[in-house]
Amino acid sequence: MPTRRANAVLPTCKENGSVLDFDTVDIYARGNTMLKGRSLIEPDNFSLEETENLFTLAGKIESDENYLRDSCRGKLLATLFFEPSTRTRLSFEAAILRLGGSCLGFADPGSSSASKGESLADTIRMAASYADAIVMRSPKEGAALLASRYSQVPVLNAGDGGHHHPTQTLTDLFTIRCLRGEIANLTVGFCGDLKFGRTVHSLAKALARYANIRVIFISPEELVIPEYIAATLQRQGVEFAETRNLEEAMPELDVLYMTRVQKERFFNEEDYIRLKDSFVLNAERMTLGKGNLVVLHPLPRVNEIAVEVDADPRAAYFKQARYGMYARMALLASILGVAE
């Protein structure tokens, strides 16, 4: 059986009531003007109530894609990506365009003045003078927080090294809410690179705020969850366990969050080669899971999910990518103050 670091169950939080009906969106859209002008650097920068209001707004947009269309006309989003991205960058660009706004920026730091030695502070000051909000990804932990200190417009962290990826967390939580009906009373498994996986770190912290969440961490010994994440879960009374065996955990899971082993985070290529195939989800292993299991992955995948799994109705990672666009539309509309 998985080994445990903590045993207590998270008590029901006063903020965590029943799932909000998407028909109540107009009330909560108005209430979410409290997010106007705010940055998002870590998942807990927004309260649980504010996060749930975002999901209600995202749900309305998902059910009616004309809702808030053109609400951001005249708004500019700067996308500054110092590290490669496909889904996050394109979903933010799609989000602002669908809201009627525009975007500018770069996808390769080599095409920016950073390649000439310009400091991050100066790059941010420049971008903030042109745009109404900034989305930034960096390979360096803490870069987004630093950027927010030099920016006069909201900064949205699109990933800072192995630290956090809060807008992916919004995507993940919104997907779980849509597919499971609520974010509560779930056993969630995280599998793969838990040491460097910023999406894992952010989602684990965010789940700790919901009622009756149990977590199982599945990884090789070399890629276990960082101690600071484990300590956060312990402080918040979340029951969690660790195992080196995916088959052992599968029957218990309501949600399985797969991740790739990230080559770019390794200093030693031999270690990467040795660990990259530690856990592969295939059709045979899927037979061990519950009938209503939800399989998520922040993507890109390499070989940790076999292509044969794509045909399984429980595989939700491509739906997850689309839900991410709706979540980011709700986020942009809220921080730009147009969700009124």
Image: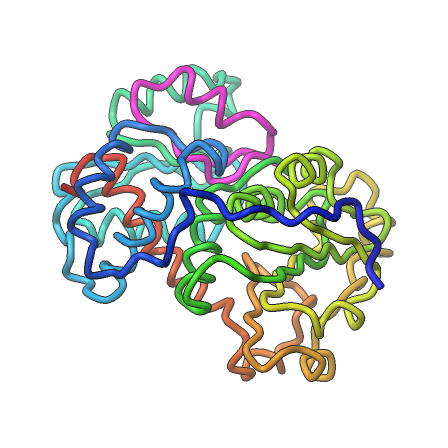
Residue 276: say if magenta: no
Please give the range of residues in magenta. 137-161
From the viewer's side, name the closer residue of 208 and 190: 208
| In front of the other: 72 or 290 | 290
Location of residue 253 in the rendering, given as x and y in whole percent from the top left corner:
65, 68
In the rendered image, the quadrant that contains the C terminus is: top left
Q: Relative to the observer, which residue lies in front, 128 or 179? A: 179
Q: Is residue 309 left or right of residue 145?
A: right
Q: Residue at x 46, y 31 (%)?
A: 41
Quarter residue 319 falls in = bottom left
Q: Residue at x 45, y 22 (%)?
A: 147
Q: In this image, 282 relative to 139: left or right?
A: right
Instruction: Specify the color scheme.
Output: rainbow
- 119 up-or-down from 262: above or below: above
Image quadrant for the N terminus? bottom right
Name which residue lies at 65% across and 49% down: 9
Location of residue 69 in the rendering, given as x and y in whole percent from the top left corner: 14, 54
Q: Position of residue 178 (x, y in %)?
A: 39, 65
In the rendered image, the vertical position of residue 223 relative to residue 303, given as above or below? above
**Residue 29: image x %, image y %?**
20, 45
